[in-house]
Amino acid sequence: MEEENGVQEERGAVRGGDGLYIHVPFCRSRCPYCHFYSTVDPAFIPQWVQAVGKEADLYRRRFTHFDSLYLGGGTPSLLPEAILGEILETLNRVFSIDPCGEITLEANPGDLTPGKLKHWKAGGINRISLGVQSLNDRELEFLKRRHTVAEARKAIDRIRYAGFDNLNLDFIYGLPGQDAGTWRQTLEGIAALQPEHLSCYELTAEAGTPLDRDVRSGKIGLPGERERRAFFLQTSSFLEARGYEHYEVSNFARGTAHYARHNRKYWNRRRYLGLGPSAHSFDGVRRWWNGRSLKRYLEMLARGRRPAEGEETLSPEQRRLEALLLGFRTRSGVALADLSLNPERRKVLRALESAGKIIQTPERLIPTPKGFLVADRLPLLFC
């Protein structure tokens, strides 16, 4: 096992290159639950493309080789084919990007045309992450998504016809009025679609979003803690029974070959570079992030300056605790060697095992689905 900052790397982690993330801050409309930075004004797309190239050039000596590239947002799939091609050409000119690596593009069903898909595949995109969110038209209307269930299914058919064999689908559960029966219907529909990867998220009212305002005002009510737990465990047991590995709190895959290579860099504390407004970066010890303003981002790069708004250097203890926090969110868990198990902590460990939240192997502590429910608390029990 390799060591990174004194903490053992997660079992099975992909070695080699770093991860490259590009934040595409453009959407056709804003979803009421979304807290990611975006704008609905496409007029700045050409300036943003040039700025991303300038920002990449500022890091050409600090980051050289990548084996994963993730275009997220925002809505990358709305970019014209020529614009996306220009971005990929620029990135490949500045950096070394492994053509056999994982290259993901986030997409909305309504943006997919046969021509776009053909262009993406020819440009090296080999993984699509499709924001379906629901297989119920009433739920899609509540979420203010721009597609219907029929359109989502058509988009998936087009993706498969274009030759993509690595597909992630995003879904949301815990919507107002949703119950175990309606969510099971969606899960059965998901299983029938046979994606290689799934991301299933609980609907949360993120601060500052329209959904948050509606929840605070009492206009909308979200499920309580007991219901949320039930949704989570239902999702895990259903998908595991159908061949999906619940390998991270919100993520499922048909075997290790389809684990999200790029996202695992975040969970394994590998190096990654983020370009674009609001993007985050990490070099193994130091973390920095760009501001949530496209205008500010463009202005800074026009002056040849890095658009970083803040940064932090983690102490060895902070790195250790962060590794525990991230490790307990994954199926691989954390190494026993990274814990100081005094008698009191061994008592806590036995209690967690008895409660079915942790499985102990000779070398690791592995969270169960019940353990995933309290993943954020587990590191505090071993500090």
Image (cartoon, grey):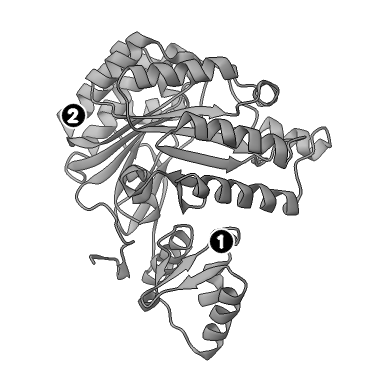
Q: Residues within 10 Å of mark 2 (few under 14, many from 20)?
A: few
**What percent of the width, then of the height, locates residue 106?**
42, 28
- Taking depth in this image into account, of 237 and 60 the one nearest to the observer is 237
**What percent of the width, then of the height, locates residue 187?**
58, 37
Q: Quadrant of the N terminus?
A: bottom left
Helix, strand or loop for disc 2: helix
Helix, strand or loop for disc 1: loop
Question: Where does label 2 land, which residue?
Answer: 92
Q: Residues within 10 Å of mark 1 (few under 14, many from 20)?
A: some
**What percent of the width, then of the height, locates residue 62?**
20, 46
Question: Where does label 1 land, which residue?
Answer: 376
Q: Residue at x 58, y 19 (%)?
A: 149
Quarter-of-image position of residue 326: bottom left
Picture layout, residue 188 above or below residue 223: above
Residues at marks 2 and 1, CA–CA distance in whole angstroms: 38 Å
Q: Which mark is residue 301?
A: none
Quarter-of-image position of residue 77: top left
